């Protein structure tokens, strides 16, 4: 399919999804490549292994391929796709948890350090985020990294707005306990790995 | 009166506090933004919380140092779609609603499926015998040309219980891809995905318990060699 040169990302996504619903594999591929990085980054918050991330992304796009006809364009395409990824990820996480139990904090990837951002704060943030239940961690990721609004997160996670607010509230409270460095205190930092 | 003012302030404090994350990620509307600005100017607790949330926001903005391989991942998705489409196009594939049918219907579907598989295996076996007999064909009819999928190097029949994921994993390991099939007999035509020797891929397939039959196909003679 050929899309007009001047088209907004939302319109582009909608047009691609209409083509996917009509069975256009090229449109699916274009949508896939457009979302891969965003989804990979989002999913890296709860699994450090790229093969798991890839599996969840591919499962997500199998669902997109099979159900594109059911999308009624009442919400944004991005909200719909990220919602599928979220639910696929949670299922995968629960399955893994049943098999392996909770994973170690050290299993998580270390984000690239922004030179303007204090390395100690990064340590605390990493440890603090890893202490949160997966739903709270992903709510933070959806809000703070992906920039979704309260209402969009409610759609993505298929939860009432009140539940999203509560998750965000508890995430902030817990992070506050783990991140004294963020509030300007001088905490005893965990020993840094050399 | 002062108690009333105190509870009003507390209510305002709680409501503004819950807006802070959305203020930080810039998804609040203009009125909510103004409300937060006004409250934060007089509330030290919310001001401090806002500073903390801004730092968390900055920290989460940083991209993780992961190597993403979208094209390689996409190829694997394409292969899954190929398998899925081939399966749904296959005439003997049981239709989806069968799973929701009654126990009796399920049993019947299972019997029909087993029969189809048995026919498939039998047909595949016949095909092997036929291949052995005509390894060096002395003639070839031009009215009934063999319609062989391009690139086909192996034909295989898989266990009906194999899942899509297992099949995909198996094909990845053997560095093969599906170019056609399944036929009515359940035979898939496979092409090589890489420069790996066909016999290596074949051995890889044959080691797997879900592979009922796998055989290298006889090279297609050049059209100029036809008698």
Image (tube, grey):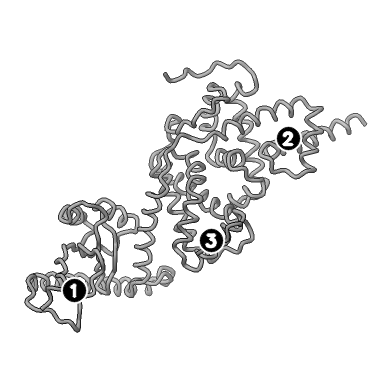
Quadrant hosting residue B79 = bottom left
Q: Check contact, mark 2 vs mark 3: CB within 8 A.
A: no
Q: Name the subunit of mark 1.
A: B
Q: Name the subunit of mark 2.
A: B
Q: Dot 3 corresponds to which residue?
A: A16
User: Furthest-bottom residue in view?
Assistant: B143
Tell me the quadrant of the picture where the C terminus of chain A can be found: top left
Vertical placement of residue A181 versus B133, above or below = above
Residue B104, image x, y percentages: 37, 74
Residue A46, image x, y percentages: 48, 39
Residue sitting at x 42%, y 48%:
B70
Q: Are marks 1 and 3 on the same chain?
A: no
User: Furthest-front residue in view?
Assistant: B224
Residue sitting at x 21%, y 54%:
B208
Q: Are marks 1 and 2 on the same chain?
A: yes
Quadrant hosting residue B33 = top right
Report helix, strand or loop for mark 3: helix
Vertical placement of residue A173 versus A16, above or below = above
Report helix, strand or loop for mark 1: helix
Residue B24, image x, y percentages: 68, 36
Judge by depth and name the residue closer to the eye, A170 or B132: B132
Q: How many marks?
A: 3
> What is the number of the mark on residue B17?
2
Q: Is residue B196 left or right of residue A110?
A: left
Residue sitting at x 25%, y 61%:
B191
Q: Is residue B182 left or right of residue B80?
A: left
Q: Dot 1 corresponds to which residue?
A: B123
Residue sitting at x 43%, y 53%:
A58
């Amino acid at each position: 399919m050929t899309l007009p040169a001047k088209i907004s990302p939302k319109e582009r996504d909608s047009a691609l999804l209409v083509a996917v619903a009509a069975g256009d594999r090229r449109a699916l591929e274009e949508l896939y490549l457009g979302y891969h990085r965003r989804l990979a980054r989002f999913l890296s918050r709860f699994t450090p292994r790229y093969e798991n991330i890839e599996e969840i992304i591919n499962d997500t796009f199998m669902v997109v391929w099979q159900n594109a006809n059911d999308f009624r364009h009442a919400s944004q395409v991005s909200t719909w796709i990220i919602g599928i990824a979220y639910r696929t990820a949670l299922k995968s996480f629960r399955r893994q948890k049943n098999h392996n139990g909770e994973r170690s904090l050290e299993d998580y990837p270390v984000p690239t350090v922004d030179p303007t951002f204090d390395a100690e704060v990064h340590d605390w943030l990493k440890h603090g985020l890893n202490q949160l239940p997966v739903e709270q961690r992903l709510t933070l990721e959806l809000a703070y990294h992906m920039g979704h609004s309260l209402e969009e997160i409610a759609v993505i996670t298929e939860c009432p707005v009140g539940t999203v607010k509560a998750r965000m509230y508890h995430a902030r409270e817990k992070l506050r306990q783990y991140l004294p460095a963020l509030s300007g205190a001088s905490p005893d930092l965990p020993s840094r790995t050399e | 009166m002062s108690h009333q003012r105190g509870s009003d302030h507390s209510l305002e404090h709680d409501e503004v506090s819950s807006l802070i994350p959305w203020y930080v990620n810039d998804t609040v509307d203009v009125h909510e933004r103004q409300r937060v600005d006004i409250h934060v100017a007089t509330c030290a607790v919310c001001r401090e919380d806002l500073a903390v949330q801004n730092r968390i926001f900055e920290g989460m903005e940083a991209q993780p140092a992961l190597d993403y391989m979208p094209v390689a991942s996409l190829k694997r998705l394409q292969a899954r779609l190929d398998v899925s489409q081939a399966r749904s196009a296959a005439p003997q594939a049981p239709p989806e609603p069968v799973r929701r049918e009654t126990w009796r219907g399920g049993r019947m579907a299972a019997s029909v499926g087993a029969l189809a598989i048995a026919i498939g295996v039998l047909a595949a076996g016949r095909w092997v015998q036929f291949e052995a007999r005509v390894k060096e064909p002395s003639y070839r009819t031009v009215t009934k040309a063999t319609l062989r999928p391009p690139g086909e190097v192996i034909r295989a029949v898989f266990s009906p219980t194999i899942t899509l994921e297992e099949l995909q994993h198996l094909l990845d390991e053997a560095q093969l891809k599906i170019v056609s099939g399944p036929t009515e007999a359940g035979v898939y035509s496979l092409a090589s995905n890489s420069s790996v020797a066909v016999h290596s891929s074949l051995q890889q397939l044959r080691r797997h318990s879900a592979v009922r039959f796998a055989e290298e196909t006889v090279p297609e003679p050049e059209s100029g060699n036809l008698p």
